[in-house]
Image (tube, helix red, strand yellow):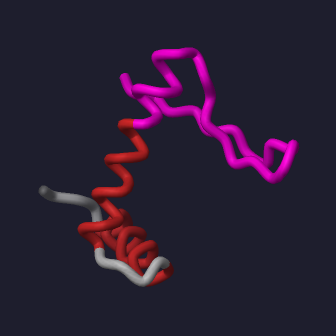
């Protein structure tokens, strides 16, 4: 797999911040995309960052 230097740096930073390795960052990213596709997009739901009752950020996943 070939990725840009910027994406590699981001995965390194995410791994470091979460005390894990790059492989786990990629695996978790794929798992989250699977959830987005199966649970959210197909059922008309949206993903978001929630704090209690407040939506902090809505996330749109483009699977096209």
Residue projecting furthest to the left: 1
Q: Residue at x 60, y 23 (%)?
A: 45
Can you say which quadrant of the picture contains the C terminus?
top left
Q: Is residue 54 left or right of residue 2?
A: right
User: Is residue 41 located in the magenta-colored stretch of the structure?
Assistant: yes
Residue drawn 36% across the image and 56% down it: 28
Residue depicted at 42% across the width and 45% down the height: 32
Image coords of residue 57 (percent x, y): 73, 45
**Where in the figure is residue 58, as x and y percent of width and height?**
69, 38
**Residue 1 location, quadrant:** bottom left
Instruction: Give residue 54's quadrant in the image.
Output: top right
**58 vs 52, nearest the viewer:** 52
Q: How many marks?
A: 0
Q: In the image, what residue occupies the spot 44% across and 78% down?
A: 13
Is 29 above or below relative to 19? above
**Left or right of 30: which side holds 45?**
right
Queried whether the magenta region covers residue 53, the answer comes back as yes
Residue found farthest to the top: 43
- Residue interval drawn in magenta: 35-64
Q: Quadrant of residue 23?
A: bottom left
Please provide percent x and percent y for residue 22. Answer: 29, 72
Task: Judge left or right: residue 21 versus residue 45.
Answer: left
């Amino acid at each position: 797999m070939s990725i840009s230097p910027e994406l590699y740096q981001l995965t390194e930073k995410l791994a470091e911040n979460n005390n894990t390795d790059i492989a786990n960052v990629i695996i978790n990213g794929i798992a989250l995309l699977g959830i987005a596709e199966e649970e959210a997009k197909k059922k008309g739901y949206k993903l978001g960052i929630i704090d209690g009752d407040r939506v902090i950020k809505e996330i749109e996943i483009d699977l096209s």
